[in-house]
Amino acid sequence: MRLSSGLPYLITFLLLSQNLMAQQPVADGIEMADRLRADGKIWVVVAVIAVVFAGIIIYLIRLDRQIGKLEKEIKEQKRSEQGVKLL
């Protein structure tokens, strides 16, 4: 049995269920969010989320560079090994 045979159905189900959950009305609003907005602390939350997101992006960029260096070294080693075998 192939793993991807049910993948389109799963994706369709997840997208439809997400859309249905977004349609539910909020009775009194979200008390915590209203309180944070009223106190002006919502900007602290936004700043923390932005810092975490920036940290993840920086980490991924550094990781990509390190992987690129390793790939380049492996290619050079294979070339040098092939050059030795040909001689």
Image (tube, rainbow, N blue to C red):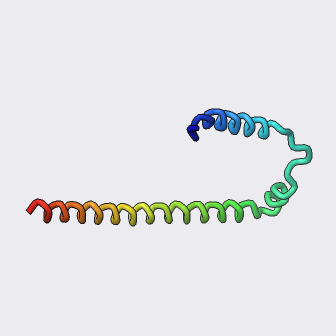
Q: Residue 44: x percent and y percent?
A: 71, 65
Q: Residue 16: x percent and y percent?
A: 72, 34
Name the residue at 69% across, 39% down.
Answer: 14
Q: The N terminus is located in which quarter?
A: top right
Name the residue at 36% across, 61% down.
Answer: 68
Note whether 81 is above or below 18 in the view shown.
below
Name the residue at 73% across, 39% down.
Answer: 18
Residue at the farthest right position: 28
Residue at the farthest left position: 87
Name the residue at 87% across, 48% down.
Answer: 29
Q: Residue 27: x percent and y percent?
A: 91, 44
Q: Is residue 53 left or right of residue 45?
A: left
Note whether 27 is above or below 69 in the view shown.
above
In depth, the one of 30 and 64 nearer the eye is 64
Q: Is residue 4 left or right of residue 69?
A: right
Q: Residue 56: x percent and y percent?
A: 55, 62
In depth, the one of 82 and 73 nearer the eye is 82
In depth, the one of 27 and 6 nearer the eye is 6
In depth, the one of 41 and 84 nearer the eye is 84
Residue 86, by quadrant, is: bottom left
Give the mark count.
0
Residue 36, by quadrant, is: bottom right
Residue 65, by quadrant, is: bottom left
Q: The C terminus is located in which quarter?
A: bottom left
